[in-house]
Image: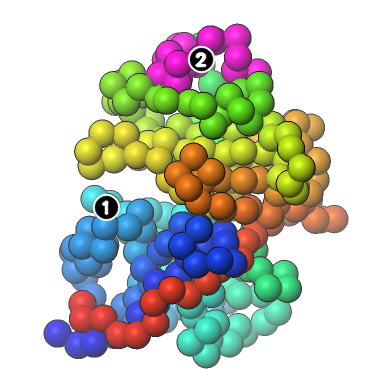
C-alpha cells in the first residue's frame, strides 16, 4: 500500500483548530471509490478529499469529496482546504483562477490576499419552503413558527433548507430535537436531510450573521463547525432577496467553541464568492 502526500487543513480560520478540518490526499490516482470511502470513514472528519488529474481541459485538478457514508458532488470547506493544500504543495493554475473539477462541474477559486474564495455554484433548487416543512423545522428547533422570519430552499448539491431567525442570540441558544428533524430527512431532505439556520448577528465584531448547520449524523444529529456550501447558498438567497448586503462576514462554529469566519461578496458581474483563511495542521504522507 503506497504512501501518498497528505495534508490536514483547518478551513475558515487563520488560527489552527478554530475552523473546520478536512483531510486531503494529494494523489488519489489508482484508488477506488470504496478505498476513498473507507479512508474517509477512518479519519472521523466531516470530509476527506482526493486530488486527481483533471479530465476537463479547463480544470487544474479533479477533486472527489467524501463524507462518512457517501460521496458529495460539492462541498465548500473541502474545496477551499484542498485548493490551499494543492497550492502549498506546488500546484500552479493554468490561468488567473484555480479551476476545480468536481461532481457539480467546474468551480472557480480565486486568491483574496491571504484567503481563498470559490464562486458559488448555481442553486439546484430555490424558493420558499412548504408550510409542512416549516412546521417541522420550527418544532425541531424548539422555536415558535412565527420566529422564522424568512426561509428558502438552499440546494447547491447538498439539500440545505435555510431559515432565518430573529437574531443571533436565538440561533446560538438552539437545542435541536434530533427525533423531530430526523423525520424531515425521511420525507423531504437528500442527502441525509440537512437543515441550515442563519440569524442576524449584532455586536462589536465584524460579523453580520451567525450561522449553524444541523444534519443527521452516525449517532443522531450532528452539527457542522463551518459550512461553505451552506453559506454559499445562503448568500445567493439572502443577497438576492435584499436580506443581506452585497458584502458581509458570517460567523459559524461559535456554539462548538470554534471561530469560523466566512467572507461573502457579490462582485460587479453578479457572481457570489465565498472565502476564508486556511491553516495546514498536518503535513506528511499517509498510507491509503
**What percent of the width, then of the height, locates residue 46?**
35, 54
Disc assigned to residue 143 = 2
Q: Nearer the viewer, residue 227 or 169?
A: 169
Decide: is 25 above or below 258: below
Q: Residue at x 50, y 58 (%)?
A: 18
Residue at coordinates 45% horizontally, 70% vertically from top-left?
9
Residue 284 x %, y %:
34, 85
Image quadrant where residue 193 sits: top left
Residue 155 visible in rendering? no
The image quadrant that residue 103 belongs to is bottom left
Q: At which x and y percent is residue 146?
A: 60, 9
Q: What residue lies at 56% left-to-right and 66% top-to-bottom? A: 15
Residue 147 in the magenta stretch? The answer is: yes
Mark seen at residue 219: none
The magenta segment is: 132-153
Residue at numbered disc 1: 68
Q: Quadrant of the N terminus?
A: bottom left
Q: Is residue 69 left or right of residue 108?
A: left
**Can residue 48 be seen?**
yes
Between marks 1 and 2, how big is the CA–CA gap? 30 Å
Going 53% across and 84% down the picture, which residue do you hit? Answer: 88
Mark 1 residue element:
loop
Q: Is residue 83 magenta?
A: no
Q: Quadrant location of the C terminus?
A: bottom left
Amino acid at each position: 500500500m503506497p504512501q501518498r502526500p497528505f495534508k490536514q487543513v483547518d478551513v475558515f480560520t487563520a488560527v489552527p483548530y478554530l475552523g473546520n478540518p478536512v483531510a486531503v490526499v494529494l494523489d488519489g490516482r489508482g484508488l477506488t471509490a470504496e478505498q476513498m470511502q473507507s479512508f474517509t470513514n477512518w479519519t472521523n472528519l466531516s470530509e476527506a478529499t482526493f486530488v486527481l488529474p483533471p479530465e476537463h481541459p479547463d480544470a487544474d485538478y479533479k477533486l472527489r469529496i467524501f463524507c462518512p457514508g457517501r460521496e458529495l458532488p460539492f462541498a465548500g470547506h473541502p474545496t477551499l482546504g484542498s485548493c490551499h493544500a494543492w497550492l502549498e504543495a506546488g500546484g500552479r493554475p493554468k490561468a488567473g483562477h484555480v479551476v476545480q473539477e468536481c461532481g457539480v462541474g467546474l468551480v472557480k477559486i480565486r486568491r483574496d490576499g491571504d484567503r481563498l474564495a470559490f464562486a458559488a455554484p448555481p442553486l439546484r433548487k430555490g424558493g420558499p419552503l412548504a408550510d409542512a416543512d416549516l412546521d417541522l423545522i420550527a418544532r425541531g428547533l424548539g422555536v415558535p413558527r412565527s420566529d422564522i422570519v424568512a426561509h428558502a430552499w438552499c440546494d447547491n448539491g447538498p439539500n440545505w433548507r435555510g431559515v432565518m431567525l430573529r437574531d443571533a442570540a436565538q440561533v446560538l441558544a438552539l437545542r435541536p430535537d434530533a427525533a423531530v428533524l430526523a423525520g424531515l430527512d425521511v420525507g423531504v431532505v437528500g442527502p441525509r436531510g440537512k437543515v441550515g439556520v442563519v440569524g442576524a448577528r449584532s455586536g462589536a465584531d465584524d460579523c453580520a450573521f451567525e450561522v449553524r448547520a444541523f444534519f443527521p449524523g452516525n449517532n443522531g444529529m450532528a452539527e457542522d463547525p463551518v459550512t461553505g456550501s451552506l453559506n454559499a447558498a445562503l448568500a445567493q438567497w439572502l443577497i438576492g432577496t435584499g436580506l443581506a448586503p452585497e458584502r458581509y462576514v458570517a460567523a459559524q462554529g461559535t456554539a462548538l467553541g470554534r471561530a469560523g469566519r466566512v467572507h461573502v461578496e457579490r462582485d460587479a458581474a453578479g457572481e457570489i464568492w465565498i472565502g476564508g483563511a486556511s491553516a495546514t495542521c498536518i503535513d506528511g504522507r499517509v498510507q491509503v
